[in-house]
Amino acid sequence: MDRSMRTTRRVFLRTAAAAPLVLPAVLRAAQTAPNEQITVGMIGTGRQSRGLVGHFLARSRVVAVCDVDTTRREDLRQRVNTHYTTYPDQGTADCAAYTDFEHLLARKDIDAVCIATPDHWHALITLAALKAGKDVYCEKPLTHNISESVAVMKAVDAYGRILQTGSMQRSSREFRVACELARNGAAGRIERIECSFGDPAIDCDLPEEPLEPGLDWNLWLGPAEYRPYHSELSPRGIHDHWPNWRRYRQYGGGAVADWGAHHLDIAQWALGMDDSGPVAVLPPEKRGAKRGARLVYANGVEVVHKDGFGVHIFGTEGEILVNRGKFWFIREGKTVAKFTQREDGGTLDSALSKAEREYLKDAKVQLYRVRDNHIGDFLEAMRTRRKPITHEGVGARSAICCHLLNLVYYYGQPIKWNPATCTFADGSGDPRWLSGSRRDYRKQAGQTAGA
């Protein structure tokens, strides 16, 4: 496709948001037959993708990779081909490689894509993939701003596709048990939840460095404003660290969006707010503080951003603390079950089993249980055409919580929020913030494609 003919990001979002909500039955019924092998294209080939690809290789067939960086793109293609050379019964070593994601999406033989690009590309590639008839696994946070969250939710419905957000904590037993305890009143009525993660994003002020050979920098920037190359945004070569583009508003949402997308997602689950959200967002008491912002829900529960355990749920009769590989349930001042370190004795599974046995035996609320793992759940949903554990509504609304917290950190103003319409309420906020605070999408044709 000629680049001059490509749709700009702003126009694409507007088109997706206005898409019809009902497709012809023949299109909505299209699905992968249970015995057919699902084919997948990997878009973005950095550190996160290198971890994800193994799960897809074990459960599907990876046929293409895409990245704007030649070195990382070719490295992942070689990994895929080496796998199929070693296990020829699983596929052929003919993985294709693309610089532009649109060329990958044009392939009719690809059923799904895995999107693991910087955040500012998530929504555009997701929307393009949905429109192309692909199911989507997209890393968290699902979007870079609130308007994108709304557009993605509408587009999944309009195109009748399956979407899984990479908020894989929901597929881990410790988080499910913690949320089931909370939802079934094991700690009494929930009063507040404290979530621990790092700082809000900042504006990018990095100086210019010599451009990395083999990198299409214009396509890396995509819809973001143009700025000279710096290796902190796209590290040279095959790197084994998390690049710092996450720190900057133009490309990510700081730790508030990076880790907040994990822990705030669990807070939403614990509160039963997957199809809703807060009604107010309060900035920290001290302007410029990097902790202390609060999401306030209609029932008075507050979710507070502060340093702590991970996710700490406070109820009228107890506390539930959970993080990856850690769990602690306190009831009326006494520990019911705990595993936070080896010195606690036992195992994580034994602590979780004890809590389930004593407080969830006849639970009225039973949450979604993943049978395989997070990616396996996505592929199973592709076959059954039922929504996966972190579908578009879950991912988009958890991302909205992150964006709302960042907005009160950026501007220091309280926000009233309507979760039903995903709009500011009672004259609060600035409508321009919905689409990215001070950021605007680049409008030039030919500058909106890449990975």
Image (tube, helix red, strand yellow):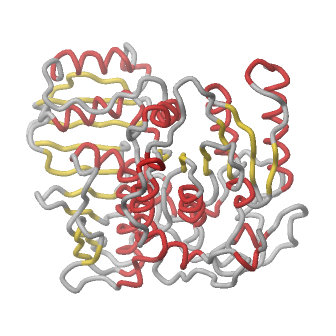
Answer with the quarter of the image where residue 216 lies. bottom right
In screen coordinates, is 399 left or right of 206?
left
Q: Is residue 197 above or below residue 365?
A: below
Nearer to me, 97 or 288? 97
Q: Is residue 102 above or below residue 351?
A: below
Nearer to me, 86 or 23? 23
Nearer to me, 10 or 227? 10
Residue 315 screen position, x and y as percent: 14, 42
Residue 136 screen position, x and y as percent: 54, 48
Quarter of the image for the C terminus: give it.
bottom right
Q: What residue is shown at x 79% (from left), y 42% (from top)? A: 76
Quarter of the image for the N terminus: give it.
bottom right
Could you tell me how many numbered marks the image carries?
0
In screen coordinates, is 331 left or right of 81?
left
Answer with the quarter of the image where residue 109 lies. top right
Q: Is residue 377 above or below residue 225?
A: above
In screen coordinates, is 299 left or right of 140?
left
Q: What residue is shown at x 50% (from left), y 55% (from top)? A: 258
Nearer to me, 397 or 302? 397
Residue 419 screen position, x and y as percent: 24, 65
Q: What residue is shown at x 70% (from left), y 56% (from top)? A: 106
Residue 303 screen position, x and y as percent: 26, 56
In screen coordinates, is 449 left or right of 349?
right
Q: What residue is shown at x 24% (from left), y 72% (from top)? A: 417
